[in-house]
Image (cartoon, grey):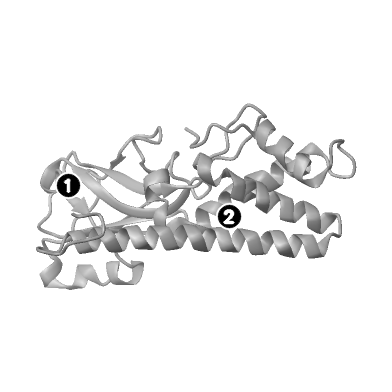
Amino acid sequence: MALSNITRKQARGDLRSRLAQITPDPINDGEFNYWLNMGQQDVALKLSSMSDHWYGTSIVQNGGTAISVSAHTTGAVNSISMVSGMLSTEIMKLKFGIGDGGDIDGKQIPMTRLEDLYNMPSLSNCDSFYSMSHHGERLYFFWGSDVSVSAATVDVFFTRKPADMSADTDYVDVPTEYVDLVIMYAQARALSKLQMLDRKSQVEQEIAAKINDIRSVYASDIQLLQMEKTPGMQTPRGQ
């Protein structure tokens, strides 16, 4: 589900107005549509430190089914191909897994570096440990020799990528308050094609300033939340 109430057609119309390009010549709708989709990805990447609550999902929530691990060998590293709903075209960042069944029922499966995962089978202190890793198009799971995964599945939580808009009725997949950044990204690409390089540089500076302002507000909110967790600490919000 897209995160804004602004359609691709509306965003493209706004973009044309900013460029005073009412007709499809010299830039057609297809180019604008491509740049708007790329703008979504750019905004999501630049704000990735704060976008988990926008794009956070799981394999089940994203239309897939939990990953079965009941046939996995314990005391070893097992690998499976990425499944529909969390392919490389859909996933931005893997977070962790939650087990269902066996000894992992309701337990968090933490993420580990792949290099460390492959060291675990040789370590006796990992016999009751379990972890997972993501590399390329595959997921890797380690189950200690004392861990039962019989009839177990894992629901993998991750941050998805914004969904590309394929029709004019599709909505821009960033929060409505940040749609302007997507349009400005496309505007900068268009200005480059029109050889209006001074204006392009100005728009890119405006984007950078907006991104910095957003990050600054987010950092301040996080700082306040941390202060409020400290017993006896009074914050500007009186909490």
**Secondary structure at numbered mark 2:** helix
Q: Which residue lies furthest to the right in this view?
A: 25
Asked whether, in this view, residue 153 is left or right of residue 216, the answer is left
Residue 202 higher or lower than 25, as above or below: below
Residue 65 higher or lower than 235, as above or below: above
Q: Which residue is drawn at 83% across and 55% down?
A: 193
Depth check: give the residue in front, 85 or 215.
Answer: 215
Depth check: give the residue in front, 39 or 79.
Answer: 39
- Of the two numbered discs 2 and 1 on the same chain, state the one appearing first in sequence: 2
Q: Residue 119: which quarter of the image?
A: bottom left
- In 3D space, how far apart are the residues under numbered discs 2 and 1 (Cα atoms)? 39 Å
Q: Do residues under tags 2 and 1 come within 8 Å of each other at their CB atoms?
A: no
Counting from the top left corner in percent of width and height, residue 112 is at: 29, 64
Q: Residue 138: which quarter of the image?
A: bottom left
Q: Which residue is labeled 1 in the image?
A: 149
Q: Which residue is drawn at 25% across and 58% down?
A: 225
